[in-house]
Image: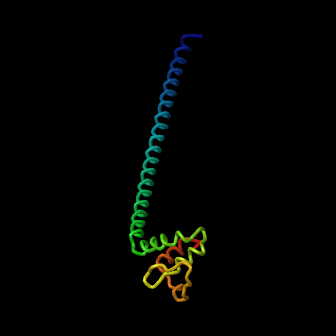
Amino acid sequence: MKLSLRIPLMFVALMLLAVGSVAGISSWRTGTALEDQARERLIGFRETRAAAVERFLEELEARMVSIATTPSTEEALREFSFALPFVDNDVSKARDILLNLNASGGLDDPDAEVPAEQAERTSHYRDVHGLYHRYF
């Protein structure tokens, strides 16, 4: 091959190599920049969701503390603690015990008859428990 043909071919090959190198480097840098941008967006989304979950849990904790400190909850826990030893895995018996409230708010004998007007009277505990527990 003649020298006059080799020199232009070498220049063309070198230019193609240079253009290919620049294109490869640009493609690599663009891909890296897109990955970094996507990673930053995901990190931001994760932090936003974590803050939302933390806010929800804090609100839930505040509601639970508020409910736990009400007098009706304290009374319900006292009534439940009294009735629990009499239950023996019998749901209907536990329900009857909790319905046997006397006029002063205490519990009567679990085996005693319940007057009809007293059985119809509801307590806060019974209302809440009826909403959230399927067995009572």
Most foreground residue, 115 or 27: 115
| Image point (48%, 72%), residue name | 82
Residue 81 coordinates in the image, percent (x, y): 48, 69
Q: Is residue 4 above or below residue 23?
A: above
Residue drawn at (43%, 58%) of the image: 52
| Residue 83: image location, x then y, percent | 51, 72
Give whichever of 91, 37 is nearer the camera. Answer: 91
Quadrant hosting residue 114? bottom right
Which of the pair 17/81 is nearer the observer? Answer: 81
The C terminus is located in which quarter? bottom right
Q: Give how far across and how far down residue 2 sits, in percent.
A: 57, 10
Q: Which residue shows up at 59% across the image and 68% down it? A: 88
Residue that protrudes farthest toward the bottom in the picture: 117
- Give the x, y percent position of residue 38: 47, 44
For the image shown, how many numbered marks are present on the structure?
0
Q: In the rendered image of this protein, does residue 79 appear above or below residue 8?
A: below
In depth, the one of 80 and 129 nearer the eye is: 80
Compared with residue 15, is residue 105 higher up or lower down, i.e. above or below? Answer: below
Q: How is the image coloured?
A: rainbow
Q: Which residue is located at x 52 percent, y 89 percent?
A: 117
Say which quadrant the N terminus sits in. top right
